[in-house]
Amino acid sequence: KAGVTQTPRYLIKTRGQQVTLSCSPISGHRSVSWYQQTPGQGLQFLFEYFSETQRNKGNFPGRFSGRQFSNSRSEMNVSTLELGDSALYLCASSPPADEQFFGPGTRLTVL
Amino acid sequence: GENVEQHPSTLSVQEGDSAVIKCTYSDSASNYFPWYKQELGKRPQLIIDIRSNVGEKKDQRIAVTLNKTAKHFSLHITETQPEDSAVYFCAASSDFGNEKLTFGTGTRLTIIP
């Protein structure tokens, strides 16, 4: 079975721009969660989608949004980028009430 | 919301010795506690997990213990090897099973040959 994939792997943007990241879960997994990883804040939960509905949300500003498609693929969008948004963005997929499998992440650099 | 504290932030042990990493959580409703290992430049990978109805779980050289009363859980690695060097994260979850994880701040474990 193919693992969780994320595109792109690396991204450089400037302040004020917006960015869209993509995540393809493991086949059959309907839950997709997104996390932000930074050296200072560690791993922080952004949001989780299940069957195209946002089921959980972390404490991030409204500039961070996401969606899930009928094939369970998910995207997250960050608008009006700030320097502090530079991070590794990880998505994870899971079957119901089971372990989360992480993707390789997208490294976002905001200049 | 849930808060997870993890100690120590760095840990160095001689190869062959044991390593222990401890975490405490704040939400008594938390019922799932996974541990992830993240090697440099790689994705976090689950190494062991425990649910709140179990006090201890072992998998070869790795074990996790859970004390629900005290709201803390620990990772034990015995007979450490150089490939155990990595950052280890504990996490806790109480929402819909396991999908929303609150992570500890991580422990950088270095095994000294």
Image (spheres, coloured by chain):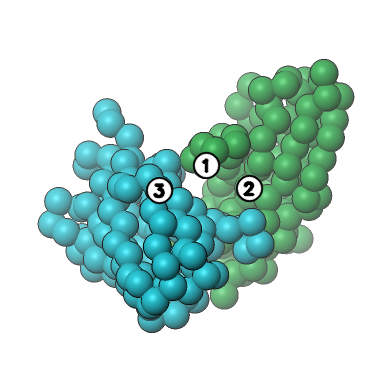
Q: Is residue B79 above or below residue A69?
A: above
Circles 2 and 1: CB atoms closer than 8 Å: yes
Amino acid type indicated by mark 3 = Tyr
Task: State left or right for residue B64 relative to residue A107.
Answer: right
User: Which residue lies under the disc numbered 3?
Assistant: A10
Amino acid type indicated by mark 1 = Pro
Chain of the residue on which disc 1 is drawn: B
Residue A3: tell me if it is visible. Answer: yes
Question: What is the secondary structure assignment of the residue under circle 2?
Answer: strand
Chain coloured green: B
Task: State left or right for residue A9 relative to residue A28.
Answer: right
Residue most extreme to the left: A70
Question: What is the secondary structure assignment of the residue under circle 3?
Answer: strand
User: Where in the figure is residue A97, as x and y percent of width and height?
Assistant: 38, 51
User: Where in the figure is residue B68, as x and y percent of width and height?
Assistant: 68, 57
Chain coloured cyan: A
Image quadrant assignment for residue B97: bottom left
Q: Which mark is residue B35?
A: none
Chain of the residue on which disc 2 is drawn: B
Circles 3 and 2: CB atoms closer than 8 Å: no
Q: Is residue A68 above or below residue B46?
A: below
User: Which residue lies under the disc numbered 1?
Assistant: B44
User: Which residue lies under the disc numbered 2?
Assistant: B89
Query: Which quadrant of the figure contains the C terminus of chain B?
Result: top right
At a point 72% along the width and 21% down the height, the residue shown is: B82
Confirm whether circles 3 and 2 share one chain: no
Image quadrant assignment for residue B108: top right
Q: CA distance from mark 3 to mark 2?
A: 24 Å
Label located before the other in sequence (2 or 1): 1
